Image (cartoon, rainbow, N blue to C red):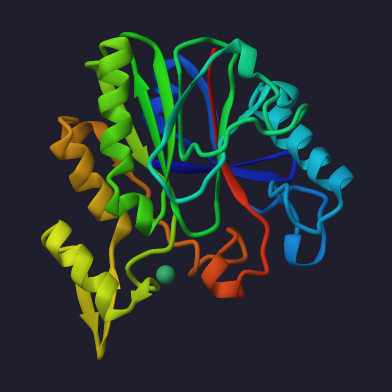
Amino acid sequence: MFKLIKNNGISYYQIESFQKTGLVDHCFTTRQGGVSVGEYESMNLRMNCDDKRENILKNYEIICNEINVDYKKLVFSNQVHEDKIYIADKTDCGNGIVFENKLKSADALITAESGVPLITFYADCVSVFLLDTEKKVIALAHSGWKGTVKNISAKTVEKMREQFECNEIIAAIGPSIGECCFEVGDDVAEIFSELNEGVVRKYGEKYHVNLQKTIENQLICAGIKQENIIVANICTCCNSDLLFSHRKTGGKRGSLAAIMQIK
Ligand SMILES: [Zn+2]
């Protein structure tokens, strides 16, 4: 379950099954509890936009302090809707926040080192959290519809197995645009109906796609047991007072983030 925590005026989600392991510090942010204003109100973590940099950095400080993460150590992804996966270590700490992002393309990040906080960004796309409880390896993947078609979540699981012999992976699929709001064109609907059964539904004349369900199926195909997968079933577009939604705002929005480190 994705549990909404409200503390010190900040709201964020934590995954109960991840919290229970005691192995990680993590959250999925909401837009509440930051200092940004206007369309970025208020917990905006989007760097490349016209929000004030000092406000963005303050937001990082607020949310990271709350979950025991040193924001100056964050390792940023560089999300381009592709399927490149980057394995981060201590030398990457600060990538994207203290020094310029050196990654040209990385929609998923993995680390096996403690104290290396990973961060990926969202405003309708799907966040995927992975944790191997035995080998103590974590990953975050950004799976928008294009990344989902490229099967980035399963590829990230595969990479964790190859590099670190991960066999005890638990997973969580975060808030994103839901089937209720994710209307797509006939071309995208066709791609998804070929990809997976039961993830495309007709609402009147229009097709809608269920991204969270598609990713759950992909993780099961990658060998993760269904009972070890948590699906948020929370729609960003239906909850735009709490979450940033690209579609709801026509792109005038800040970014949410998934943040996770091994303790
Ligand atoms: Zn919705």
Task: Name which residue lies at 32% across and 11% down.
Answer: 164
Q: In terms of depth relative to the viewer, which is nearer, 108 or 60?
A: 108
* Residue 127 seen in this snapshot: yes
Residue 123: give x, y in percent of width and height: 55, 57
Q: Is residue 180 left or right of residue 33?
A: left
Compared to 231, does 207 lie above or below?
below
* Residue 29 seen in this snapshot: no
Locate the N terminus by quadrant.
top left
Locate the C terminus by quadrant.
top right
The quadrant holding residue 228 is top left
Residue 160: give x, y in percent of width and height: 32, 20
Task: Name which residue lies at 45% across and 25% down.
Answer: 19
Q: In terms of depth relative to the viewer, which is nearer, 1 or 257?
A: 257
Quadrant of picture, ligand 1: bottom left
Task: Name which residue lies at 25% across and 26% down.
Answer: 158
Residue 96: give x, y in percent of width and height: 69, 33
Compared to 26, does 133 lie above or below?
above
The quadrant holding residue 132 is top left
